[in-house]
Amino acid sequence: MAEFIHNDLVFDITDSGLATLVQCRSSKTSVMVPAVVNHCGRVCRVVAVADSAFKKSQCIEVNVAEGVKSIGPECFAKSSLKKLFLPKSVMSVGDLAFDECGSLSVIRCAAKNPPEFQMAGFLNKSDVEVVVPVGSSKLYMASDGWGEFGRFSESDEVMNQTAADCGSDVMSLVASLSERVSALERRLAEFEERMSHNE
């Protein structure tokens, strides 16, 4: 497994090309967990955010792109997090993910069915608004973990955020790969020219 740093985010990359965000080193107040990263010219899908990845981070807002499936235990514990977006691909949120997140005010979840979630941790849950797709609030209120929060609202917009974020990641990756292809094409042309002179 290889370690790779992208925009001050540390990823573990498996041999099969799957990436897990293991640590946020960014000093920015807003962080985007990308859908894909480019590691040595290879497109790697980001599928998880590991345990304690944002623990004690100064990030105020975190947006997670479509494709990420799990958020690890204590992921945002003791951080400065205020706003979080979770895409519909997220299937589980680890225990104590928001432990001692005293500033947390909004969690936006694009999944119609609540991701598996057992215990939020120690924070004032009545101050946190959970925004979910239209028709899903009762499911969240009745589920473990999510039911601990005091305020729920429904919005159609939460379903549309994921596509925009994911599209931004893919476009930046395509631009990066295009630059690499162009550079390789130039080197190949130079090599072929040298070979023709040698003949």
Image: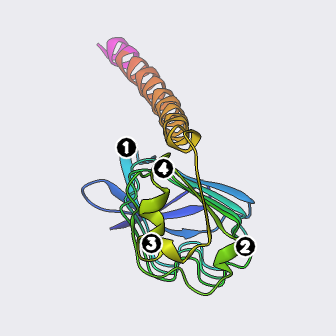
For label 1, the residue is 43
Which amino acid type corresponds to the residue marked 3 in the rendered image?
Ala
Indicate the position of residue 196 as horizontal and vertical percent values: 33, 12
Residue at image location 30% in from the left, 62% down from the top: 14
Ranked by sequence position, the earlier of labels 3 and 1 is: 1
Depth-wise, is mark 2 or mark 3 nearer the camera?
2
For label 4, the residue is 110
Depth-wise, is mark 2 or mark 4 nearer the camera?
4
C-alpha distance separating marks 3 and 4: 20 Å
Magenta-highlighted residues: 193-199
User: What secondary structure is found at the residue carrying circle 4?
Assistant: loop
For label 2, the residue is 80
Ranked by sequence position, the earlier of labels 2 and 4 is: 2
**Mark 1 and mark 4 in contact (Cβ < 8 Å)?**
no
Depth-wise, is mark 3 or mark 4 nearer the camera?
4
Vertically, is 146 above or below 74? above
| Left or right, 41 with reference to 79 | left
Which quadrant holds residue 165? top right
Is residue 21 shown to the viewer in this render?
Answer: no
Depth-wise, is mark 2 or mark 1 nearer the camera?
2
User: What secondary structure is found at the residue carrying circle 1?
Assistant: strand
Give the class, few, some or many, for how many residues have Cα within 10 Å of label 1's Cα (few <14, many ≥20): some
For label 3, the residue is 50
Vertically, is 7 above or below 48? above
Which amino acid type corresponds to the residue marked 4 in the rendered image?
Ala
Indicate the position of residue 135 as horizontal and vertical percent values: 46, 48
| Front-most of residues 149 and 183 | 149
- Which mark identifies residue 132? none
Ranked by sequence position, the earlier of labels 3 and 4 is: 3
